């Protein structure tokens, strides 16, 4: 938080100049200062969401509207208001692509959840009769690989349910396993364009670095560094896990009809997104939406052949009676607060960039510190500030970096949130799910070991992928 305050103070110092053409630099004007304070206040409310129970989307959406209204008003007084509209539409276009992409991904995940795919995996693991240590490694590895396709929040909650079901009253096992899950879920999302919003943002930005373009397959160069990020702290945690075998059994829950077909379609949809981007040079979201069309046809087939779901309501509003299977009910269950929070962040950061703050920040950090130090700092900052605005700020600055440096900031922004339990959605969610067992201070005790993994992953990337620099 002190770093964030220092940065904001630094950014408030320049005076009004003309940046390029008629684009004004308002970093020293009262409009710029008020905009920074609005964003800072909104983000304080986001951080306090767990305590004040105010949805995180509300403050950033309001701040975004006020910031752009102030910008538009000032540019109107200068007679150059059309520039603001062009900039605003550009930000909306970037958000729209990511919104539609995420809606499709969330729809598939919710459909798989409704078909009991994740629940079947959970009960299967419980029935295997693994020891606490074996379960610790199994859930960690599964979290690492599942989060490469699903988001880290869903992955952490799924594996957290397994840990809670088997761990029971063994709080030490639950605590250490939950920490491992947070690290593994964040690390797994860092090497796949589908694993985290930040990696998706970097991929969809279609970046042409100083020594080449960033395509889909480049992200997998982060596989080993991301794995090291989890393995290093997990190796230390292993010895703190009780060397015992949990008691109790669970009944295996079967998957519903169509589950494997939906899973297959999800993999096909991912292939379509990659193909549309790599071979047709179209936005990946076109492939995702095409896959959603295929899913809708499958959903129609399931409905006309008599499949039902418990997720909707019948005409009387009774949720106890099954209703015909409908894929649009899965779209309705998307995490809309997160999606609108993302909108608020994109528009706020876009507004601050339009005011001139991000170019100043880019010159200060990337110009003064060097790309490597700056990208390492991005990961540390993301342990306090959500990695979405941090990464969007970097993408808006668009510093001139090599492919290796872009992959470095993708890695650090993805795994840096593991340093603190509040640094990622996975950590915050597990604190609620494992309330009383997994806590902020319980996680903090292991932060030095997690930081060792953070440093090891950076070193591994610099060593293995030096050809990308």
Image (cartoon, helix red, strand yellow):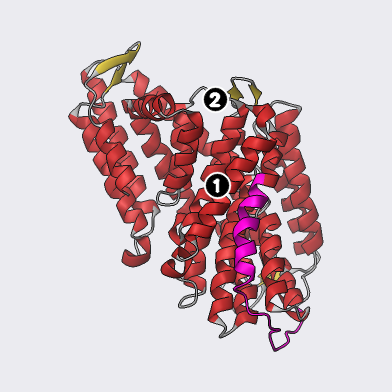
Q: Look at 81% across and 65% down and name the residue there.
A: 305
Q: Position of residue 35 (x, y in %)?
A: 26, 36
- Graded by Cα atoms within 10 Å as few (under 14), some (14 to 19) or many (20 or more), the crowding at tag 1 reads some
Front-most of residues 223 and 373: 373
Q: Quadrant of residue 106?
A: bottom right
For the question of whether residue 265 can be seen, the reply is yes
In the rendered image, residue 230 lying in the magenta stretch gets the answer yes
Q: Position of residue 38 (x, y in %)?
A: 26, 43
Front-most of residues 293 and 98: 98
Helix, strand or loop at mark 2? loop
**Residue hosting label 1:** 455
The C terminus, quarter of image:
top right
In the image, the segment drawn in magenta is 225-252
In the displayed structure image, the side of residue 369 where residue 429 appears, left or right: right
Q: Look at 59% across and 73% down and name the residue there.
A: 240
Q: Quadrant of residue 33?
A: top left
Helix, strand or loop at mark 1? helix
In the rendered image, residue 275 lying in the magenta stretch gets the answer no
Q: Position of residue 74 (x, y in %)?
A: 23, 25
Q: Look at 46% across and 70% down and name the residue there.
A: 442
For the question of whether residue 324 can be seen, the reply is no
């Amino acid at each position: 938080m002190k770093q964030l305050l220092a940065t904001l103070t630094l950014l408030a110092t320049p005076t009004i100049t003309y940046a390029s053409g008629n684009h004004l630099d308002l970093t020293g004007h009262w409009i710029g200062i008020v905009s920074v304070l609005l964003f800072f206040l909104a983000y304080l409310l986001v951080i306090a969401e767990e305590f004040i129970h105010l949805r995180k989307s509300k403050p950033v959406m309001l701040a975004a509207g006020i910031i752009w209204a102030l910008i538009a008003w000032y540019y109107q007084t200068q007679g150059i208001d059309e520039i603001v509209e062009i900039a605003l539409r550009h930000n909306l276009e970037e958000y729209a692509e990511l919104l539609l992409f995420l809606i499709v991904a969330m729809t598939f995940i919710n459909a798989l959840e409704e078909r009991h795919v994740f629940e079947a995996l959970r009960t299967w693991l419980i029935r295997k009769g693994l020891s606490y240590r074996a379960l610790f490694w199994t859930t960690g590895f599964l979290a690492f690989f599942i989060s490469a396709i699903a988001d880290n929040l869903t992955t952490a909650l799924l594996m957290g349910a397994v840990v809670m079901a088997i761990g029971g009253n063994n709080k030490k096992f639950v605590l250490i396993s939950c920490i491992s899950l947070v690290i593994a879920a964040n690390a797994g999302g860092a090497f796949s364009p589908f694993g985290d919003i930040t990696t998706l943002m970097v991929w969809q930005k279609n970046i042409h670095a100083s020594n080449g373009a960033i395509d889909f397959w480049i992200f997998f160069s982060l596989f080993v560094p991301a794995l090291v990020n989890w393995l290093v702290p997990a190796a230390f945690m292993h010895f703190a896990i009780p060397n015992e075998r949990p008691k109790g059994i669970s009944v295996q829950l079967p998957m519903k009809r169509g589950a494997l077909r939906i899973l297959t379609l999800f993999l096909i949809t991912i292939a379509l997104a990659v193909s549309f981007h790599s071979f047709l040079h179209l936005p990946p979201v076109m492939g995702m939406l095409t896959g959603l069309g295929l899913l809708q046809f499958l959903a129609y087939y399931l409905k006309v052949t008599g499949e039902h779901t418990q997720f909707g309501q019948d005409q009387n509003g009774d949720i106890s009676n099954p209703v015909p299977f409908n894929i649009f009910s899965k779209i309705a269950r998307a995490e809309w607060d997160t999606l609108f929070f993302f909108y608020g962040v994109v528009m706020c950061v876009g507004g601050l960039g339009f005011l001139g703050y991000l170019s100043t920040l880019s010159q200060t950090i990337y110009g003064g510190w060097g790309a490597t130090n700056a990208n390492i700092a991005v990961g540390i900052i993301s342990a306090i500030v959500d990695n979405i605005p941090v990464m969007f700020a970097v993408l808006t600055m668009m510093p001139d970096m090599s492919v290796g440096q872009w992959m470095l900031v993708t890695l650090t922004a993805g795994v840096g949130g593991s340093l603190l339990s509040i640094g990622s959605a996975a950590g915050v969610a597990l604190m609620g799910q494992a309330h009383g067992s997994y806590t902020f201070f319980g996680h903090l005790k292991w932060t030095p070991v997690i930081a060792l993994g953070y440093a090891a992953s950076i070193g591994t990337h610099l060593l293995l992928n030096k050809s990308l620099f």
